């Protein structure tokens, strides 16, 4: 990340000089920080609001109910992890927290599931199910993309949540593509 | 759809509050503690937002961003992706706050209800910070050989980007 950031700044100055954009590049270097403050004041406040609502949902037991509902399809996808009760509970909690967009709850549960899966497999190398867990976690499967909605609302969207069907469809396809790719690579690596 | 859709956020909050009260949860306390969590998240991303938005603004003003977009345009338009979102796609798997900064900038510049703004929003909402997740999970599990996890996750990201663009152009392209 350091290289990308430093590179971007150096490239801007070099490019700006070559383009003759001295003034606007110079002004831009001081405008970004202000934009970050604007962003935090408008969008940040809405992120806080949604974190509050999600906490209400978590405490009302919505996450546990979702976890139970997900246990059957997840058992099919992760037959080995399903044999260990603790690992499997962490896995279900991880996926349902992802569904609700509870990043703070999803990561510790996912790590617990990953550690359990690592104990089941060969030490040091990722098992097929561990790869699958990571792939599912890298493809967002959020039902309510609250951060995005907050950014849209702060920028005057008529209905910040009207992108929901598009987000669901592309999340679902990308998770599916990830699972298929993982299965395909697994089959290829066995040959 | 739009008139009813504007009520969605309010309806979600109302439903959550009602369900919480029925379940005997102290909803006000839960709400305020959740907001505190959110504040921590915002505080945590603020330093990188200052750094990254400075870089994004400089890249845009210098014309380097336009040059990159022109370079990527043939490939992206072939896939049906708005070329303006190219930088977002490159940054999305690497940095969560960087992607948030770029997407926020695209949405502010092109408008929240524009095609580019909507595509950026859907892309941001339907993908994750792939390399961060991979690093955290494999480090926690003590695994060094990640095997095919990186290519498989990137396949998922690319699919997400293409489908995002396709959905937005199908649903709102006529406007």
Image: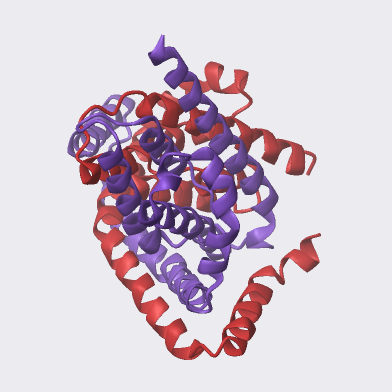
Chain colours: A purple, B red
Query: Number of labelled discs?
Result: 0
Query: Between residues B37 and A187, which one lies in front from this camera angle?
Result: A187
> Relative to residue B117, is residue B75 depicted above or below?
above
> Relative to residue A19, is residue B15 depicted above or below?
below
**Side of B19 relative to A32 (left or right):** right
The picture places residue A115, in percent across and down from the top left corner, at: 27, 47
Q: Quadrant of residue A119?
A: top left
Residue B18 shows in the view = yes
Query: Between residues B48 and B31, which one lies in front from this camera angle?
Result: B31
**Side of A9 relative to B166 (left or right):** left
The picture places residue B76, in percent across and down from the top left corner, at: 55, 23
Toward the front, the furthest residue is A83
Query: Between residues A128 and A165, which one lies in front from this camera angle?
Result: A128
Q: Residue at x 36, y 24 (%)?
A: B148
Q: Quadrant of residue B10?
A: bottom right
Residue A24 shows in the view = no
The picture places residue A166, in percent across and down from the top left corner, at: 67, 45
Q: Residue at x 28, y 29 (%)?
A: B146
* Quarter of the rendering occupied by the C terminus of chain A: top left
């Amino acid at each position: 990340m350091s290289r990308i950031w430093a590179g971007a700044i150096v490239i801007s100055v070099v490019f700006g000089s070559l383009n003759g954009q001295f003034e606007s590049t110079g002004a831009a270097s001081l405008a970004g920080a202000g934009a970050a403050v604007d962003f935090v004041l408008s969008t940040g406040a809405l992120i806080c609001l949604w974190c509050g609502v999600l906490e209400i949902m978590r405490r009302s037991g919505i996450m546990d109910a979702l976890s139970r509902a997900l246990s059957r399809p997840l058992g099919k996808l992760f037959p080995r992890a399903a044999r260990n009760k603790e690992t499997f509970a962490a896995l279900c909690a991880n996926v349902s927290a992802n569904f609700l967009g509870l990043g703070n709850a999803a990561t510790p549960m996912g790590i617990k599931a990953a550690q359990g899966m690592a104990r089941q497999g060969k030490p040091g190398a990722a098992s097929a199910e561990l790869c699958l867990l990571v792939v599912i976690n890298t493809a967002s499967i959020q039902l309510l993309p609250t951060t995005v909605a907050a950014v849209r609302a702060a920028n005057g969207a008529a209905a910040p949540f009207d992108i929901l069907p598009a987000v669901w469809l592309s999340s679902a396809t990308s998770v599916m593509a990830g699972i298929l790719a993982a299965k395909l690579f697994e089959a290829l690596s066995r040959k | 759809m739009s008139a009813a859709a504007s009520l969605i956020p309010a309806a979600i909050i109302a439903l959550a509050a009602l369900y919480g009260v029925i379940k005997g949860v102290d909803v006000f306390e839960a709400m305020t503690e959740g907001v505190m969590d959110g504040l921590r998240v915002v505080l945590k991303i603020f330093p990188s937002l200052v750094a990254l938005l400075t870089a994004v603004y400089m890249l845009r003003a210098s014309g380097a961003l336009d040059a990159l977009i022109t370079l990527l345009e043939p490939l992206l338009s072939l896939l049906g992706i708005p070329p303006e979102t190219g930088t977002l796609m490159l940054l999305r798997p690497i940095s969560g706050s960087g992607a948030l900064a770029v997407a926020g900038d695209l949405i502010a510049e092109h408008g929240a209800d524009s095609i580019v703004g909507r595509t950026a929003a859907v892309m941001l909402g339907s993908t994750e910070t792939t390399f961060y997740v991979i690093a955290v999970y494999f480090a926690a599990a003590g695994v060094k050989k990640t095997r095919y996890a990186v290519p498989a996750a990137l396949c998922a990201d690319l699919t997400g980007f293409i489908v995002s663009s396709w959905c937005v152009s199908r649903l709102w392209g006529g406007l």
